[in-house]
Image: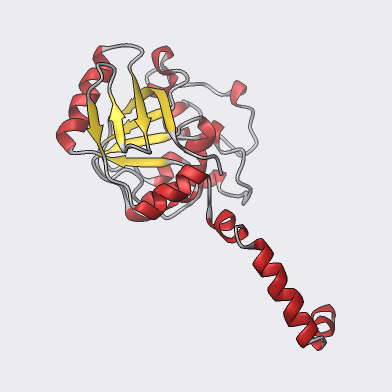
Amino acid sequence: MQAFTVHKGLVAPMDRANVDTDAIIPKQFLKSIKRSGFGPNLFDEWRYLDKGAPGQDPASRKPNPEFVLNQPRYQGASVLLARQNFGCGSSREHAPWALDQFGFRALIAPSYADIFFNNCFKNGLLPIVLPEAQVARLFDEVVAFPGYALTVDLPRQVVVKPDGAELPFEVQAFRKYCLLNGFDDIGLTLRHADKIRAYEAERLARLPWLAQTTLG
């Protein structure tokens, strides 16, 4: 998992409340259990005017020029600004995968669905919660100023606006530690790889019949 420390990125505004995970990555694209290839179908039913299918070349699709992520001013955005209850609906982990693979590193919203919120941290995305009034002000500023970018400073737990103003946010200490070091659940376990190998060797020496049981 990619570590997250300080990130500065262009902001794209997703001005919709209660965006569910089926909108983030529609169900027809969930056939793969690989953690790759989902970015082209992020917000698929909103990004395109035609119906997409798994494996279809995005270049053959008809983009919706009205959708925010298709607008030239938001190309290359890596911070997504959203409204309340972002990521509601089913608990598909593919949603943060698609956001990450599209290029987003941080999300900012007044609230998130709990399972989606947890899945973001496990996949290297930083979901930031800010008061609704602050989020509303950010929406106004993003729309008013093309090229609007924010700096997300995880060590200091602040979002820095273009004028230097800082918006503090909370993040649970363990989640912060994992993001700063790029540890997902597997990475956390592999920190103890030497101890695991030593235990397995000791157990096999003490109970050699386990090897025969495993091989059989």
Does the image show residue 51? no
The residue under the point 28% across, 12% down is: 145
Does the image show residue 165? yes
For residue 145, above or below residue 181: above
Image location of residue 163, percent across then percent down: 24, 16
The residue under the point 33% across, 37% down is: 156
For residue 192, above or below residue 152: below
Left or right relative to 200: residue 29 = left
User: Quarter-wise, where is residue 215 in the image?
Assistant: bottom right
User: Quarter-wise, where is residue 68 in the image?
Assistant: top left
Left or right relative to 130: residue 95 = right
User: Quarter-wise, where is residue 59 in the image?
Assistant: top right
Image location of residue 195, percent across then percent down: 65, 68
The residue under the point 32% across, 40% down is: 128
- Quadrant of the drawing holding the N terminus: top right
In this rendered view, identify the residue nearer to me: 76 or 1.
Answer: 1
Image location of residue 83, percent across then percent down: 26, 36
In this rendered view, identify the residue nearer to me: 214 or 157.
Answer: 157
In this rendered view, identify the residue nearer to me: 137 or 153.
Answer: 153
Left or right relative to 211: residue 127 = left
The residue under the point 44% across, 20% down is: 70
For residue 146, above or below residue 20: above
